[in-house]
Amino acid sequence: MTMLLEMDRVSVRAGEKILVSDLSMTLDRGERVGLIGESGSGKSLTALAATGLLPSGLTASGSVLLGGQQVVGVPDQVLDRVRGTGAAIVFQEPLSALDPLMTVGMQIAEPLARRARRNGAPITGTRLKEAVLELIDDVALPDERRIARAYPHELSGGQRQRVAIAMALACEPDLLIADEPTTALDVTTQAEILILIDRLVQERQMALLFISHDLPVVANTVERVMVLRLGEAVETGTVSEVFNRPQHDYTKSLVAAAKRFDAAMEGRT
Ligand SMILES: Nc1ncnc2c1ncn2[C@@H]1O[C@H](COP(=O)(O)OP(=O)(O)OP(=O)(O)O)[C@@H](O)[C@H]1O
């Protein structure tokens, strides 16, 4: 069986400027891979290139096969079929994924109805409402009916991120891409969202592409990591290989910085 995601020598350019360079990676069904690297190293652009969602002005070259479908150089109408079903993205700032003028229930209903139509079993009316409430419950939000009636600004940051996750799940994706999903949240909420993502990925047997600059979180969440620096993959391997025996100087410095931070925090307790 083919890999769920196969990126082969993918580059992303803004005009002449190369932002991601010759990047290759694969992700198997059910596998969890982390992308790490400092700010601006190309993590988000790699995720966007994987799903054909690069902003206008940026172009990708190379090959990206998502669920066997070529993503690079393919018109939007064709990609609409793989987006959402092949992969769904949860972003750092949940407000960016939510429409401020629509109730949460309506926003979750949209991808749910779309996915049901694609599955050849459309759902509407009461059944759609029930499916929305079920998803809200699945992401461990209390009082489903109240949440469904609420607008995004009436929810906390953590609740909004749960709604964004519910919208991603509504697509029943094979691959969940989480791009710094907890960076905008307070520490307690961060831990809760990570536990939620971990549970949902397991229950729904999704693959996970997890982007973060927080090495301990990455180590706890994924099996394999790729280290990006200035748009290039400098090292890949299992979590244990990369974090315990980093080969590249850049990875060594990232790991050393994370250890120094941990030691400083321990010294304070
Ligand atoms: N639309 C764009 N046009 C031009 N350059 C861009 C665009 N989007 C991103 N870049 C540049 O591409 C590089 C990689 O950006 P990217 O967002 O992938 O980094 P990142 O590793 O995800 O960083 P962060 O951790 O801060 O989110 C950066 O130098 C960024 O300034």
Image (cartoon, rainbow, N blue to C red):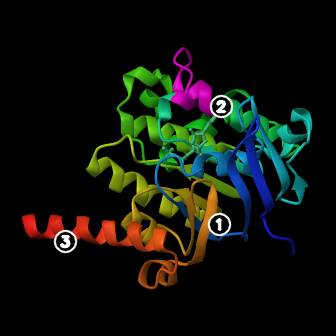
The residue drawn where x is 61% and y is 33% is 108
**x and y percentages locating residue 199 in the rendered image:** 49, 63
Q: Earlier in the sequence, mark 1 or mark 2?
A: 2
Inspect the magenta stretch and tell me whether residue 97 lies in it. Answer: yes
Outermost residue, front side: 16
One can see residue 35 in this view: yes
* Eye-nearest disc, 1 or 2: 1
**Extent of the magenta region:** 96-109
Give the position of the C terminus as an image quadrant.
bottom left
* Eye-nearest disc, 2 or 3: 3
Front residue of 73/189: it is: 73
SS at mark 1 in the image: loop
Residue that badge 1 annotates = 205
* Eye-nearest disc, 1 or 3: 3
Residue that badge 2 annotates = 109
Question: What kind of residue is marked 3?
Answer: Ala
Residue that badge 3 annotates = 263
The residue drawn where x is 35% and y is 32% is 156
The residue drawn where x is 58% and y is 52% is 43
The residue drawn where x is 65% and y is 62% is 206
